Image (tube, grey):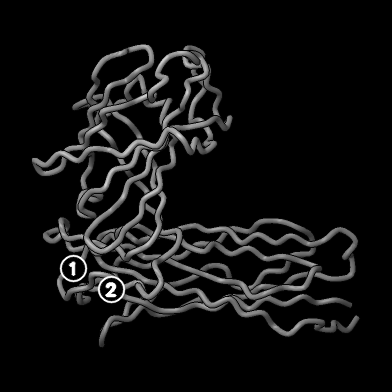
Amino acid sequence: MKLKKILATVVAAALLAGNMTIPSFAEQVGRVDGAYTAKLTMLQKGKTSPSMCDPLFVEKADVTISGNDAVIRSYVAFPVPGFPTDGADGTVKDVKLSYQGQSYEAELDLETKPLKPMKKTVSMFGTTEGEEISTEIVSFTVPKAALEETVLPVSAYVGVVMHSNVSFDMKLEDLTLVKAAEGSGGESGQTEDKNNRSLTVRATVAATPSAYTVTIPEAISMGELDLKQDNEKNYDVKVDIEAGNDDGYVKISAAEKGDLKAGGSSIAFTNSFGTREFRQSGTESATLSVLAKELKNKKPGDYTGTTVFHIEYLTK
């Protein structure tokens, strides 16, 4: 049967920002201002294995970058279910972070108590993986260059089980842009020789009819672009179609190729999404790629570009 388009094409424009990494300039940080998330692990001091207290810390930390500063906001179980009467004045307190010989004291919030999922089931602590419990907020304000360290030394008084001062190595990885600050344009702190950047994708979907909802990630970070190996990042597109809409389906298409540009230089990227049809609710994965060969002899700096998602609802 002839298909009739019942909705004008919805266009979701995705802004991409990327940067090459030149190892000799790895200490130079050029992440855009905005809100990020990161995976947090508390390691044993000087070791690569998690500390005994690591399961008390929520796996996802929030990071906010503004100018030359970064706020690292971590969350720790409070109170600890297995020890409800311990640590009444905080599961951890007197928390300090060290960076390049300077000590940064944490700000502790015992009042807000946001609910966060626990990363691991530990019978001694009474925690269950994925269970949301109240938490203490531990926030550090540090130079944003600290985010590029492999680990950051942290000391704290642990008021549960140990009841003593403990030293950790805090590891932050998979720093992912959630929302860029207004006006940052993906180029905050840009100078000609800053190379330690990330490729990000931000997308906004226009209003859709009640028959369906399309969700495209607001932000995707490919991390630091590798000069020797091809760079890939998977992302998901989710479609929810209301029950009873058996006669229609959602068609989404995206350009397969595009360019990231900085001045007179450009880097090609590919998007594997192509064209896909959703006849029922579901989630589809695709991959953004930047080939290592595309980075050869490219000028370091911030690269930006756009890709477009066309979204249609079709019915017989």
Residue tagged 1: 194
Q: Which residue appears farthest toward the left when viewing the image? A: 101
Counting residues from the N terminus, which is met first, the one under dot 1 or under dot 2? 1
Expressed as whole percent of the image width and height from the top left, the position of residue 235 reads 52, 58
Percent of width and height locating residue 99: 15, 42
Label 1 – label 2 distance at C-alpha: 8 Å
| The label number, if any, that marks residue 138 in the structure image | none
Location of the C terminus by quadrant is bottom right
Judging depth in this view, the residue of 282 and 163 nearest the camera is 163
Neighbourhood count class around disc 1 (C-alpha, 10 Å): few under 14, some 14–19, many 20 upward: many
Residue at 49 percent of width and 35 percent of height: 113
Instruction: Check the image and report above or below for 155 versus 211.
Output: above
Query: Of helix, strand and loop, which one carries label 2?
Result: strand
Work out whether residue 157 or residue 289 is closer to the camera in this orientation and state it.
157
The amino acid marked with disc number 1 is Lys
Name the kind of residue labelled 2 in the image.
Answer: Asp
Labelled pair 1, 2 in contact (Cβ < 8 Å): yes
On screen, residue 233 above or below 137: below
Q: Where is residue 242 in the image (x, y as percent from the top left)?
A: 82, 61
Q: Is mark 1 on a helix, strand or loop?
A: loop
- How many numbered dots are placed on residues in this image? 2
Crowding near the residue tagged with mark 2, few <14, some 14–19, many ≥20 C-alpha atoms within 10 Å: many
Assign the N terminus to one quadrant of the image: bottom right
Question: In front here: 75 or 240?
Answer: 75
Residue 302 is marked as 2
